[in-house]
């Protein structure tokens, strides 16, 4: 049985349903140190103090939900090394973007289980490539089982934070993600408001439908550019206006904005957290990464984009702005930031 460890200094425990501390959400697992969306990445994230592990969900041809950043698995698996699947390489248009590769919806679960995960950012994170070929593609049921097992062994509640990928696209194929996800949550005994589950989406209409089907908390994801693929808004930026945030609060528990919607590239905070809180929404921004290429310019170190900058300070700054949780590729730094942060005296 695994010996689960908690990151030093992370004594604060977040209650689920009503959080008592900002949540640490492991973005695809501890993906700064292991290939993303693998059980090894989730296991490490839990050891490092994450409260939630995040699986992005895409369907298989035979109706299972597997965990991949995208349904195009050319960058995250060794499928190009499998000659038996060479003929299935194809080009598709997904949410208006043309892509070439291999797609989960063209494979059965049994076929996908013959593949192995690889590091998606090998140039940025070369150390992670030593784990290439060591992990299978997990299912949502395997991720839930891991969270439950880790909860029992650590005495901490470890939750899941699944994202429904491309819901309109998959519904058009007759492979809707939501019914399969709800069935897995129901089987886990988690279909309740205080369950350790958040469901997130970049689209709007599937969250509105989910709000009528489940009691678990829903998170509206928001990007700085483009628009939801379901046509619900002309642009994502329209969703951060105070009136739009009040509309989101009718169906969602909170929002997941990209970091630059909270702190702009000039290191100036926006009003988004204040406006969202005024609407009754929690705020879980994404994604805190240690490499300077991903940091706000104020927290970069040197000129090498791969060099780790001052992520701890960036996290602490956002905590000071009042975030209710945050996504990170480095959960242990998130645990350090939360443990060391003190709310400024008023």
Image (cartoon, rainbow, N blue to C red):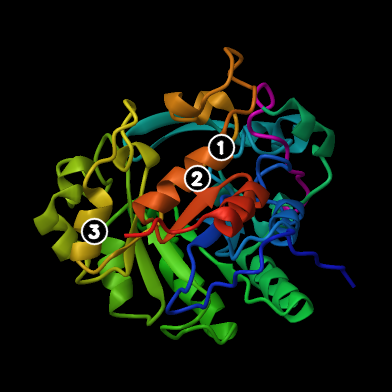
Q: Are dots 2 and 1 in contact, CB under 8 Å? A: yes
> Between residues 246 and 304, which one lies in front from this camera angle?
304
| Residue that numbered label 2 is attached to | 315
**Viewed as shown, does residue 95 lie left or right of 249?**
right
Query: Residue 97: percent from the left, percent from the top?
Result: 36, 31
Q: Is residue 115 magenta?
A: yes
Inter-mark Cα distance, 2 to 1: 6 Å
The residue that appears at 30% across and 40% down in the rendered structure is 261
- Please name the residue shown 58% across and 84% down the image: 187
Note whether residue 54 is visible: no
- Quick one: SS at disc 2? helix
* 287 w.r.t. 310: above or below: below
Residue 212 appears at what percent x and percent y?
28, 79
Residue nearest the observer in this picture, 80 or 260 = 260
The vertical placement of 178 against 344, above or below, is below
Q: Which segment did they paint magenta?
A: 113-124
Marks 3 and 1: which is nearer the front?
A: 1
The residue labelled by disc 1 is 311
Q: Answer yes or no: do the residues labelled 3 and 1 have beta carbons within 8 Å?
A: no
Mark 1 residue crowding within 10 angstroms, few (<14) / some (14–19) / many (20+): many
């Amino acid at each position: 049985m695994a010996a689960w460890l908690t990151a030093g200094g992370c004594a604060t425990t977040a209650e689920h349903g009503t959080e008592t501390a900002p949540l640490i959400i492991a973005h695809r697992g501890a993906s700064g140190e292991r290939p993303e969306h693998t059980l090894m990445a989730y296991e490490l994230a839990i050891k490092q103090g994450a409260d939630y592990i995040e699986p992005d969900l895409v369907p298989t041809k035979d109706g299972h939900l597997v965990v991949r950043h995208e349904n195009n698995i050319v960058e995250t698996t060794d499928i190009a090394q499998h000659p038996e699947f060479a003929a299935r390489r194809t080009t598709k248009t997904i949410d208006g973007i043309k892509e070439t590769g291999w797609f989960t919806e063209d494979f059965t679960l049994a076929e996908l289980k013959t593949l192995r995960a690889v590091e998606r950012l090998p140039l940025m994170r070369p150390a992670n490539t030593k784990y290439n070929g060591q992990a299978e593609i997990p299912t949502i049921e395997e991720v839930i089982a891991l969270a439950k097992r880790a909860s029992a062994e650590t005495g901490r509640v470890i939750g899941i934070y699944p994202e429904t990928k491309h819901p309109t696209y998959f519904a058009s194929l007759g492979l809707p993600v939501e019914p399969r996800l709800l069935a897995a949550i129901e089987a886990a005994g988690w279909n309740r408001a205080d369950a350790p589950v958040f469901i997130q989406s970049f689209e709007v209409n599937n969250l509105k439908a989910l709000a009528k089907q489940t009691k678990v908390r829903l998170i509206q994801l928001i990007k700085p550019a483009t628009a939801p693929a379901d046509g619900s808004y002309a642009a994502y930026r329209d969703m951060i206006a105070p009136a739009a945030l009040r509309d989101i609060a009718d169906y969602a528990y909170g929002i997941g904005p990209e970091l630059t919607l909270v702190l702009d590239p000039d290191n100036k905070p926006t009003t988004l957290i204040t406006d969202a809180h005024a609407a009754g929404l929690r705020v879980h921004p994404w994604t805190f990464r240690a490499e300077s290429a991903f940091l706000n310019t104020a927290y970069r170190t040197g000129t090498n984009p791969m060099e780790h900058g001052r992520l701890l300070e960036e996290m602490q700054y956002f905590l000071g702005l009042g975030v209710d949780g945050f996504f990170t590729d480095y959960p242990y730094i998130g645990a350090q930031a939360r443990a060391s942060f003190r709310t400024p005296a008023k």
